[in-house]
Structures are given as structure tokens and as C-alpha cells.
Image: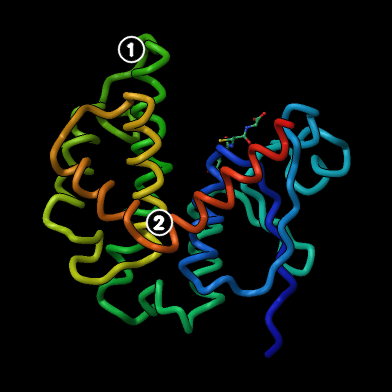
Amino acid sequence: MALPKIVHYHAPNTRSFTIRWLFEELGSPPHDLKVLNMKKGEHKSAEFLAINPMGKVPTVTADGTPVTEVGAIAIFLADLYSDAKLAPEVTDPARGTYLRWIVFNHAAIEPAVMDKARNTPAGFPSSALGYGSYDDTVNALAAAIGNGPYVLGDRFSAADVVIGSAVRYLTMFKLLPEKPEFSSYIERMTSRPAFKSALAKDEELAKALAS
Ligand SMILES: N[C@@H](CCC(=O)N[C@@H](CS)C(=O)NCC(=O)O)C(=O)O
């Protein structure tokens, strides 16, 4: 079956970098990169809002059907380009762990750090929060990547691109505490050739948009 035509709506220095890095790890399969200039508000244009009403990147379309949210896009692309072997198959015992940590990024890490950063007043008991508490979330994350070298042990996967991007970005903004588990994982992730190549491309793009 022919693969769908993929378009990646992107802006540099955003969560969309995760998907740019993932494309590099997947061996750069053919796709269109559509850059949105956020300073010019292109992500809030009527044309783009018709694709993603949140007006956010990353957004990917597959034969015109939108896929949004970093985790969903990562799962989608890693399954689509399965030859790259960045996703355990559905029957693989590692599939559950793989999905678990990709979803944990959206379900626990992001809300926990954002609530803390914004000083959100405690309105609910922690048992009612999907992430429980900031400390529980951070400790669970550290335990998940602490033994490593990857989320799936010896096997690098798209889950590392999602978790690796989040840990790097949140550490840069001091939204995660300093922990050896985080610093060594960041070192492992950022030394990957695909990461370096994606970063160089994104930096070049950011410069071009700024000039
Ligand atoms: N839940 C979304 C979040 C995406 C998101 O918030 N992207 C930011 C950039 S990091 C954005 O597009 N912000 C533009 C805006 O909301 O105006 C995902 O995981 O993809």
C-alpha cells in the first residue's frame, strides 16, 4: 500500500523540534516541511486553524488528515515508517512500556511542571490529578530513564525522542530539578547524530526567520 503524503507544519524552537528530530531518526522519509512564522502569526491564520483549531505546532497531515499532539504524531510516524524499527510492534511485549512513557509526557510530565511553574493553586486533592504530585512525577520519570540507556532498556525508540526532548527542554528552562538521571540521559540523547542534524537545521531556520 502506498504511504500517505505527509506534511509537517513546523516552527523552530518549539515542541515541533521533537518531530523534526524524529524524522531524522527515521532516516528522513520524504515529507513536506511547512514552516509557520509565529512572529507573523501564521499559526493563527484561517488556513492553518482549519487544519488545527488550536493553532499549534507540531501538526502533521497524512493525505490531508491532521494528526496533532507530539505523542500521537510520534506514535503515528514511527508506526508508518516501521522499517526504521523505532516502534515495537503491537504484539511485542515492549509495546506497552513504549506507549506508557510517550503518553506519560502529556498526561503527567507537562501538567505537573506547568502547574508548578504557574503556581496553580491547589484546588483538587492530588489523588484527583492525573499526575498525582510533581515529586511523584519527577521520581517516576527519573526511574524510567535512570537505568537506561533508553526508555526500553537497550533499545532506542521513538519514546526516547519524545521523553528526551521533554527532559532536555524542561531542564533548559529549570522546570525539572537537577538529577544525574536527567543529565546523563540528555547527554546520551543530544550526542546522537540525528539529534545534532535536526538541531543544526532548526537553528539555521530560526536564523533565517529572524533576519
Ligand atoms: N499539546 C501540544 C502542545 C503544542 C504547543 O503548545 N505548541 C506550542 C509551541 S511549543 C505552540 O504552537 N504555541 C503557539 C500558540 O499556542 O500560540 C502538543 O503536544 O503538540
CB atoms at circles 2 and 1 under 8 Å apart? no
- SS of the residue under disc 1: loop
Identify residue for label 2: 161
Q: Looking at the image, which is closer to me, 188 or 106?
A: 188
* Quadrant of the snapshot with the N terminus: bottom right
- SS of the residue under disc 2: helix
Task: Please name the residue shown 48% across and 64% down the image.
Answer: 75
Q: Judge the density around disc 1: few (<14), some (14-19), many (≥20) Cα neighbours within 10 Å.
A: few
Residue 31 coordinates in the image, percent (x, y): 69, 68
Instruction: Quadrant for residue 108, please give it.
Output: top left
Quadrant for ligand 1?
Answer: top right
What amino acid is found at the position of numbered circle 2 in the picture? Val
Task: Please name the residue shown 57% across and 43% down the image.
Answer: 203
Q: Looking at the image, which is closer to me, 105 or 24?
A: 24
Task: Please name the residue shown 34% across and 82% down the image.
Answer: 91
What amino acid is found at the position of numbered circle 1 in the picture? Ala
Residue 121 lies, with reference to residue 10, above or below; the image says above
Identify residue for label 1: 122
Residue 113 lies, with reference to residue 19, above or below; the image says above
Residue 8 coordinates in the image, percent (x, y): 68, 57
Instruction: Quadrant for residue 209, please give it.
Output: top right
* Quadrant of the snapshot with the C terminus: top right
**Distance CA(mark 2)–CA(mark 1):** 32 Å
In the picture provided, is 113 more to the left or to the right than 17?
Answer: left
Residue that lies at the very extreme toward the bottom in this rendered image: 1
In the picture provided, is 204 more to the left or to the right than 164?
Answer: right
Task: Please name the residue shown 64% across and 38% down the image.
Answer: 206
Instruction: Quadrant for residue 44, please give it.
Output: top right
* Numbered circles on residues, count: 2
Residue 22 coordinates in the image, percent (x, y): 49, 61
